Image (cartoon, rainbow, N blue to C red):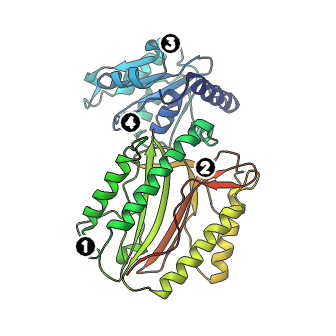
Amino acid sequence: MSFSREEYQKRLKKVKSMMEKKGIELLISHDTNNMNYLTGYDAWSFYYAQCAIVHINADEPLCFVRAQDAGGAYIKTYLKDENIIVYDENYIHTWPKHPYDYLVKIIKDRKWDKLSIGVEMDAHYFTAFCYEKITQGLPNAKIKDSERLVNWARFAKSDAEIKYMKNAALISEKGMKTAMEVIKPGVRQCDAVGEIQKTLFYGTPEFGGEYSSIATLLPTGKGTSASHLTATQDKFVEGEATIVELSGVYKRYHAPMARTVLLGKPDQLKIDTMKKTIEALEAGIKVTKAGNTANDVAQAFWGILDKYGIEKKSRTGYSIGIGYPPDWGEHTLNIYKEEMTELVPNSCFHMIAVMQFGDWGVEASESIRVTDNGCELFCNYPKELHIKS
């Protein structure tokens, strides 16, 4: 187990309280991150049907997994054996049969088929077929969207979770240091990422890293004007900039960071733009504290961009914590204008200052922990444009 039994029980109590307020008697949580949060389950099995099931009166959740993955559930979760529900291999890729046929049977056998059931309508891997099986198999149940209930339960972290994110941040710092060392003219992007990934997995002498929920992003040259580009076999070119966005991972907790490196002679336009970008980022950080809203942070951030006439339409931050592919965001908080979500102690978000101008761009980002009196940055690494001449 990654956490104490007491911590998992506190999480369950929080989730059940939120279920009660939403009128949900049975929650089916398909989100991989939420399964980890509720049960401790951690395996690369999310490509097929699995879920955590919470009954409003239950002492523990149920962990519903494929037979091949049952061993992982027994090893990784804090649950009693009877609360690990296993479906047979004959449900795998045998359409129209589906694992949720067996889930429906479990719900009916336990006389839960007339309850108000919450499902995660927008969760990754919760397919239309999953939803169809539930609605057709449980005609007497009241099926409703749980509206990211567990995601919001994860919003404020425990001190133990914060410690894991700090460990992840130390790995992020090492990964970024490697990136700045290996990115050179004539080096293939894939070779550079190979060295970065090695560092992220090696971690520190005290603890190793894990796979990230997002690949190391490495837009370079004209690619810096685009988002979410990954490495190719092309070589880095003198005079071009490269944006590096990565995250160390510790026990599935992330602390992402982005920085920009310029190869060759200093480019005053890029240097000045990076300074303005950092000024906006720091303005947002300055007003980050419990009681303020996402809008407060966004207004401070965009106030600097407006001063310089820089246009940015995309959001500038989102909540982070546990992460599985394809995303390290929690799908709750957005740092954007008119987003009135209140920041609370130990809520954490990734604040991204990326500026794109047609055929070039620069970026810096920070993972941030909200505190009573302000905030703290998880990573400690210079934000300035890194110039390698």
Residue 230: x percent and y percent? 33, 62
Query: Residue sitting at 36 percent across and 54 percent down?
Result: 215
Residue 263: x percent and y percent? 36, 78
* Residue type marked 3: Arg
Dot 4 or dot 2: first in sequence order is 4
* Residue type marked 2: Cys
Q: Nearer the viewer, mark 3 or mark 2?
A: 2
Which residue is nearer to you in this view: 219 or 141? 219
Image marks 1 and 2: residues in contact by CB distance under 8 Å: no
> Exactly how many numbered labels are in the figure?
4
Crowd around label 2: few <14 · some 14–19 · many ≥20 (10 Å): many
- Tag 3, which secondary structure? loop
Dot 3 or dot 2: first in sequence order is 3
How far is the residue under mark 3 from the one under mark 2?
Answer: 38 Å
Residue 181: x percent and y percent? 35, 67
Dot 4 or dot 1: first in sequence order is 4
* Residue type marked 4: Phe
Q: Is residue 376 left or right of residue 140?
A: right
Crowd around label 4: few <14 · some 14–19 · many ≥20 (10 Å): few
Residue 348 is tagged as 2
Residue 298: x percent and y percent? 66, 64
How far is the residue under mark 4 from the one under mark 2?
Answer: 34 Å
- Tag 4, which secondary structure? helix
Dot 1 or dot 2: first in sequence order is 1
Image marks 4 and 1: residues in contact by CB distance under 8 Å: no
Q: Which residue is mark 3?
A: 110
Crowd around label 1: few <14 · some 14–19 · many ≥20 (10 Å): some
Which residue is nearer to you in this view: 26 or 224? 224
Q: Which residue is mark 1?
A: 235
* Residue type marked 1: Lys
